[in-house]
Amino acid sequence: MSKKKSKPAVAVLGAGYWGRNLVRDFWELGALKAVYDPDPRVQAELAVAYPGLVIVDSTRAILGDEKIQALAIATPAPTHAALTLEALAAGKDVLVEKPLALSVEDGEAMVAEAKRRKRILMVDHLLNRHPAYVELKKMARGGALGRILTLWSRRHNFGRIRKDENVSWSFAPHDVAMILGLVGQSPLRVEATGAAYLTDGVEDIVEGALFFPDNVTAHLSVSWLSPNKEQRLAIVGTKKMATFDDTAPWEGKLVLYDHKVDWKNQTPRAIKDEAGRKIPFEPLESLKEQCRIFLGCVESRSAPSDSDGAEALEVMKVLLALDQALKRVPTEPAQPKPAGAKPTAEAAAKAPTWPSGALPETPREDGTGYFAHPTAVIEPGAKIGSGCKIWHFSHVLDDTVIGPGTNVGQNVVIGPGVKVGAGCKIQNNVSVYKGVELEDFVFCGPSCVFTNVVNPRAFVPRMDELRPTLVGRGTTVGANATIVCGHTLGRFCLIGAGAVVTSDVPDYALMVGVPAKRIGWVCQCGVRLPKDLVCPSCGQAYRDEPARLTPLGFDLEVD
């Protein structure tokens, strides 16, 4: 009698709003072995709901357990890249909640690491598994709809409102994944408009347009400030049209319409198929089906047919292009063209190609697109990331590397040989000289100063005595502060305006004065922490250890 093969052992990181669904389904599939969530209330609920389930007190306990073969990660989006990379390095297969990551660099690193380690990397693009969508995709790819002309998708609801990602990152990954799956290729251009009503810079409503080859277009609308719930995808072909309405009963979720256009005397007339035809399919629970497919991939060592890292990276690039388009620098309005005029070859060659969809490009040898004011000077040896903005009278010197999405204010000098991370903001009148390195998301206030030599003299050359300065990820340096060279500013620390830093600064430290002294701690979100070390703004909790602060919950460090 053959022995029944056991399912791969899976652990879940994060059992909150969405993670609890993964806990339920992997438990019911007989694969769940352990869960980690930092919230004691969640831990207590899990202990009652799942008797015998192992609830660990750290991510390290899971990563170090050789019996655990795979992880399902359902943590906040900013932690996806770090936790996934750490899990892959530990030899685990990973199913990660959407979005894959929040930057192309992180996403590419995750895909490359999974390939290098020969690990499964799958992303929770849940609707790729919805039976109605699967049937719709068969019809579209099989030619039942004819040539695809246009698609539109609406995902509206009241809530869940986020502060660390806008509605397109929260809602639109599903829609973008479905659209790319139906069209079968990536867009050439992306446009978007949106509005932020609740949190500055975090759009609550986004309207996007994707432009594909062969004049195929797609339009999406996402909002968490809508009075009604709506989740509908429509596709228009030359033969037929179809809708996938996920709020409808099962029997009415997928409807095929035999609409026609009748031309009479050179005038088009719509011939409607009022009722349409409801397309039958076998109802399935999409998430459980996805969990089942993930387990199958772990067992067979084969990548999923869709929703793998590469597919998720394409979705993420569209989301980033939507973000860039939302922050578009205004340009001269286009001149009106005669009705029916076709673009010239010259105009087509100048049209922005995806994923720029955002900023006017300054041509570069490396092909990277960014915005630079005409008065800015960019030396040929500099490398500028996509989506950067470099404003009036700023100068970027040779061998300088600036990460994507960084904003460089007026009268700023960077380089030579300086590395600036992604998403930084360098305000007016700042000089970042050789020897200084800024990690991702550093804020440099107006007129702050970085030195690179301890005892400079105008008449004594000392460029061979440079002392390096490292400014950690997420750090804020206040206006007119001075950072004396040879020191490290820890991650997410905050240097007060006018302070003079003369020694290393711990992570999360709040530093003020001359010389600067620590007067407290700050949260990752920038709010000063009270005595209980629980952020009053975002709720993140910390633990005070000797001379350092450690965030409770998910460890963002990558070994």
Image: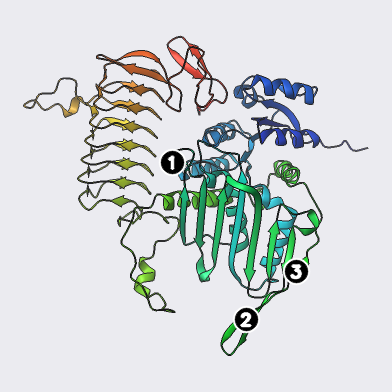
Tell me the SS state at disc 3.
loop
Kind of residue indicated by mark 1:
Gly
Q: With respect to residue 244, does 530 lie above or below? A: above
The residue at which mark 2 appears reads as 269
Q: Tell me if I can see residue 336 in this picture.
A: yes
- Seen from this angle, which residue lies furthest right? 1
The front one of 93 and 107 is: 107
Relative horizontal placement of residue 161, taking residue 241 as reference (left or right): left
Kind of residue indicated by mark 3:
Gly
Relative horizontal placement of residue 502, taking residue 168 as reference (left or right): left
- Seen from this angle, which residue lies furthest bottom? 265
The residue at which mark 3 appears reads as 276
| Image coords of residue 306 (percent x, y) | 64, 52
Q: Which mark is residue 201?
A: 1
Which of disc 3 and disc 1 is earlier in sequence?
A: 1
**Distance from label 1 to label 2 (Cα)?**
44 Å
Displayed quadrant of residue 70: top right
Displayed quadrant of residue 500: top left
Q: With respect to residue 540, does 124 lie above or below? A: below
Q: Which mark is residue 484?
A: none
The front one of 217 and 30 is: 217
- Mark nearest the camera among 2 and 3 is 2
- Mark nearest the camera among 1 and 2 is 2
Tell me the SS state at disc 2.
strand
Q: With respect to residue 201, does 436 lie above or below? A: above
| Image coords of residue 140 (percent x, y) | 67, 66
